[in-house]
Amino acid sequence: MVSPLSSTTDTPTEAPRDTVREEALARVLEALGANVVDSLLKPNDDIWIRVTAESWRATGETLKSLGFTYFGFLSVIDWLPSPFGKGEDDPTAPPVERSTTIKQGYAGGETRFQVFARLVQPFTTLGINIKVDVDDAVMAVDSWSSVFAGANWHEREAHEMFGIGFNGHPDLRNMYLPSDFEGHPMRKDFPLLARIVKPWPGIVDVEPLPGDDSEEGEAS
Amino acid sequence: MTMLGDRQQLAYIAAQAADARVNVELETEGMTLNIGPQHPATHGTLRIIARLDGEQVVWAEPSAGYMHRGYEKLTEVRTFPQVTALVNRIDWLGSFANEVPFILAAEKLMGVEAPSRAQHIRTILFELSRIANVSLFLGDLGVQLGAITPVFFAFRDREYVLNLIEAATGGRFHPNFDRIGGLKDDLPAGFIDETRVVMKKLRTFCDQIEDLLFGNEIFQARTRGIGVIPKDVALSYGLSGANLRASGVDWDLRRDQDIPMAWNKTEFKVITHPDGDSFARCWVRLQEVRESTKIVDQLLDTIPAGPVMAKVPKIIKVPEGEAWVSTENPLGEMGYYVVSQGDQGPFRVKIRSASFNNISIVPWLLKGVYVPDIITILASLYFILGDIDR
Amino acid sequence: MAKPKVPGMFKGLGVTFATLLATAKNGADTVQYPHEKETPPIRARGVIALHEGNCTSCMLCVRSCPDWCIYIEGHKELAPPRRAGGAARKVNKLDRFDIDYALCMYCGICVEVCPFDALFWSPEYEYSETRIADLLHDKSKLGEWMQTVPEAPELEAGAEKKGKK
Amino acid sequence: MNAVLLSADLPYWAISLLRVLGGLVAVLLPAGTVVYLFLFKMLSFMQSRLGPMEAGPYGSMQLFAEVGKWLQKEDIVPASAQPEARIFKMAPLIVLASTFLLVVVVPFGPDAWFTNFETGIFYALAVSSVSVLGILIAGWSSANKYSLLGGLRAAGQLVAYELPMVLAVIGVVIQAGTMNLQEIVVAQNAGSMFGWDGLGNPYVLTQFVAFLIFMISVQAELSQTPFDMPIAESELVSGYMTEYSGFRFLIFFIGEFATAGVFAMIASVLFLGGWGVPFSWFGWTTIDSIDNWMNVAGPLILFAKMMALVFFIMWIRFSSPRLREDQLQRFAWKVLIPISLVNIMLTAVLKVAF
């Protein structure tokens, strides 16, 4: 069960091949056909696939029939870079210009929001990460709750935190927030107030000598 | 290990059906019982809204979120070393175990691997935090069922483990000892000998709990055949850890997964139970504490010499990429999906905590049980609020 | 379980009775806290002590604190030259060093990042206050904790000695 | 006590006063001792800790401190219980009253008793169920769902266990041939087993099954673990006591432990020979021939026997989890009652045979 590669000292000399995952990916690609937009395999690490939004529920069903019966998790990524940074800006200084270009992750993507989930084949650790683009105009994908019972709560959480709808979900109530809460806290453009109400103590610097212009004071 | 016979299971189902028939005949208006958020049985602030018919639950729904701290959001404004201090607080009873998958995910992205001594010590501390966590569960189980003595035994013996963790890491509850590339420090002198003594004490503790609680006929009457989770339901809800193994699924990420930790250098049994009821879940946990003490003993014997820190830059920037690492934490499978964009801090961290999935089965499981069984089932599912709400 | 069948209830009664006798004979496992105290281990993270002389107000601890609970203010000063005839040195003088223990989460990152060994952990833990504002320890109070800082412990066999930090 | 006092020829008011004082002592002294010795110390030692140590030597004054604390607390009536505030306030008193009524029939010595009913045990069992009313009232009038569930569970449980208790006692009554508690004591101590009177004839030996059933029922009547689902602090948050605070909670508390003491006294009267020692030790034959010092020693002997029984009650309480409500009912109706009926039959047959 433990592969011989687990030993920590020797590194494999040849390019690592991962036949188990390659075979699994081939089977998945075959079963899903044209629904897969993109896929990525990192040897001895993981598989990523991206499917079309229309086939999201069908993907879940197909993968379940392929033996990926264990539901890991489901969540959303907001690929927009945070307009607030780490909240370490000086409030008195002019606002910092931040890049707003979206840099997608593994298996690519075209939209700001991506729903991603992880399914695992039980008794192995062969897992698969499935991503799906969420159209900004629709902001919804199909629900997986009828395929995997465990997806129910994950979708509720994703709905509340990112504002993504899940068509066919029985009950998209808020789990954490009051029902009249406005906004979706996990979106990158939702400010983290704790980092805004108080200025960063690291902004202040050592006061220079009167009349000294050089920024870097030589200590000792 | 006793199997719950088909006959017993059928009898349980028949009894439930008979109750349901009686309820239809004597239909009265139900009562909504609000258990929590401040309730002794919900260790933390879980709220259960139960619709009752007499003492029988018609419908129940847990309502989490009274302790949501938004860790996924908070990680986005922190650097990788700062996140370690944060994720300690997710499952606060087994906090060291929370750090490990996160650090492993970051190491995977950076392409570094901790030296084998660090891996050993990590595994030792991981198992110690499992013992600390689950031994408290065993005591708490007694309280939920009305036996007040086990919890004091649990606190007494957990204290020894916490002392060990504190001696090694400096923090009783929140060690923050893991670093990308290794550990903050080596073990202090005397740690190994002391740990051996404590492991013996904990095995005695397990015997005591077994005699005091698990062997008790009343305990068995309260837990056997109650809250049965079949195998496929458990898988589709994404249950993990002892809850899954108690349903007869022989799956342990410590054994079945290839990650840079020292478990594959030890011999241990993966405990499973075929019944899937409350008793099975509790029993599996008890045996797992025993196995953990044995794992720790073996690791103490084989701990290699060497450094505890690989060469990593002082200011850590994690290269772009995505990584998923999960480990078999005290509560179940805990994993982190880390997305990095080459910054000092992660871009997005999805925390897959065990209790969130484990507790999502509650509405399914609580239908038709009696009010006292709510408590037993919740206790046997064993959740920690920080682990649900994150 | 092929042992002779003792009803489980009686086994449980036996456990409690054995503990009763053991407690009566050997004393309890608890400690009567205000009267007797257990010493925390050497590494215990109780309170942070400041060695003011070592601090160069480099702001590293402030900037790496996840909770933003350290506040430093400082100014530059001219110090007499080291060697006779040398130029006067500019040194950082610490004006304020506060740690707000109401915010601190005892992660120890500040102690770790300090490049000049100015911050130390002390296992002292009895500093609770009735007013939350009193938990803000200023530099004189943080300096007092220095007396309670223990020597770093010996390491376990097989450990690689490394530079003190 | 009655006879002693009568012989002293005191005025009526003084006798009444002394009786009241005696009743208070007989209820509160066992309760206090039980709480300190068992709840504070034995429980703590069983859990490997010391228990209260600050108030007085070894924490012996802790109980007074607790009582003082409770008395200072506000007497809260929840807003939703306001319409029935009087009933709500009355409930703990009813529970405590049943304890006082119960202690009346317990004989403490050859002449030391409050009343000497011919049908003492009948009266005791009848009066003990008055507390059900108090608990039911408390659960209902609290206007709290937890309390309601607790009160209903308590009512169901106390009614269910009243029956095996009565049936267990019937065995003793058959064997003793009387319902008078004083005479049951005498019958045990003056009796003999197969001609050997070194131990008298304590019914715990001949009526062992009845003794067990009686003690189990007592455990249930007192709502002690494993039969404590009316209180069930981990699910019902103390059940019918949830809404009570301060003084009224204190009364419930005293009631609980005083009743434990009084039931243990009754059990020792019925099964362990009560205040007496085997008469053959001192050559007594009937109640009239007993030396007068037994009126002082008797209460102490009874107290010692009571403590031994309470020890068992508490020991089981501290070591076992609790049953579920339906399991408890099933246990009463399907196990205890049939066994006690068989016991009655056997006793009757043997009584006739010998």
Image (cartoon, grey):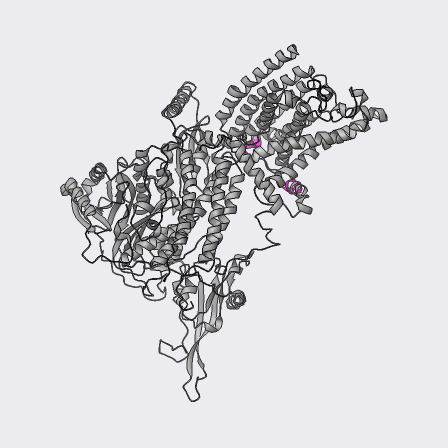
Q: Is residue B40 visible?
A: no
Residue D330 appears at what percent x and percent y? 50, 22
Inspect the magenta stretch and tell me whether residue D74 lies in it: yes
Residue C84 appears at what percent x and percent y? 44, 88
Residue B301 appears at what percent x and percent y? 40, 53
Q: Nearer the viewer, residue A121 or B76?
A: A121
The image quarter in which residue D115 lies: top right
Inspect the magenta stretch and tell me whether residue B158 lies in it: no
Q: Nearer the viewer, residue A205 or C56?
A: C56
Q: Nearer the viewer, residue D326 or B221?
A: B221
Residue that extends furthest to the top in the rendered view of this protein: D352
The image quarter in which residue D41 lies: top right
Work out whether B248 lies above or below A46: above
Work out whether A77 lies above or below D46: below
The image quarter in which residue D107 lies: top right
Q: Name the magenta segment's main secondary structure.
A: helix
Work out whether C84 lies above or below D112: below
Q: Nearer the viewer, residue A132 or B116?
A: B116
Relative side of B145 to B96, left or right: right
Q: Is residue B146 visible?
A: yes
Work out whether B385 lies above or below C150: above
Relative side of B45 to A140, left or right: right
Question: Which residues are the magenta region?
Answer: D67-82
Residue that extends furthest to the bottom in the rendered view of this protein: C85
From the image, which quarter does the N terminus of chain B lie in?
top left
